[in-house]
């Protein structure tokens, strides 16, 4: 238990705020220690990093090989939307 001695001139609310801050600091220290030692989420982080790496690699490879086909698909979609918009108005 934390014991704080009040010199003359300090009221009870000041002592309570110091006590609350010390409890909060102890709680945050305990939480940080638990999070630092907890290894349960490590696999999830590794899989997320692996998925990100695969995504970056795919983004670097696919535009050169698939770009003409993707460009053709988007061109057809754009022309279809243009025709549909002109018929609707």
Image (cartoon, grey):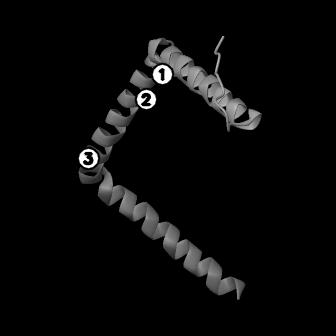
Q: Nearer the viewer, residue 26 or 55?
A: 26
> Which circle marks residue 48 in the picture?
2
Calculate the distance from the C-alpha at mark 2 to the C-alpha at mark 3: 18 Å
Q: Are marks 3 and 1 in contact (CB under 8 Å)?
A: no
Q: Based on the displayed image, in which of its 4 quarters is residue 43 positioned?
A: top left
Residue lying furthest right in this view?
A: 12
- The crowd level at tag 2 (other Cα within 10 Å; few <14, some 14-19, many 20+) is few
- The residue positioned 55% from the left and 17% from the top of the image is 30
- The residue positioned 37% from the left and 63% from the top of the image is 71
Q: Earlier in the sequence, mark 2 or mark 3?
A: 2
Q: Earlier in the sequence, mark 3 or mark 1?
A: 1
Residue where numbered disc 3 is placed = 60
8 versus 37 height, above or below: below
Quarter of the image containing the C terminus? bottom right
Q: Are marks 2 and 3 in contact (CB under 8 Å)?
A: no
- The residue positioned 51% from the left and 67% from the top of the image is 77
Q: Position of residue 3 (x, y in %)?
A: 65, 16
53 versus 31 height, above or below: below
Residue where numbered disc 1 is placed = 44
- Which marked residue is nearer to the observer: mark 3 or mark 1? 1
- The crowd level at tag 3 (other Cα within 10 Å; few <14, some 14-19, many 20+) is few
56 versus 47 height, above or below: below
- The residue positioned 29% from the left and 53% from the top of the image is 63
Q: Based on the displayed image, in which of its 4 quarters is residue 1 positioned?
A: top right
């Amino acid at each position: 238990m934390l014991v704080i001695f009040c010199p003359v001139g300090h009221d009870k609310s000041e002592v309570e705020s110091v006590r609350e801050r010390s409890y909060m600091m102890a709680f945050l220290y305990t939480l940080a220690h638990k999070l630092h030692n907890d290894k349960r989420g490590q696999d999830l982080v590794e899989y997320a990093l692996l998925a990100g790496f695969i995504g970056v690699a795919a983004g670097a490879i696919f535009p050169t090989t698939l770009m003409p086909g993707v460009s053709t698909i988007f061109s057809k979609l754009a022309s279809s939307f243009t025709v549909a918009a002109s018929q609707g108005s």
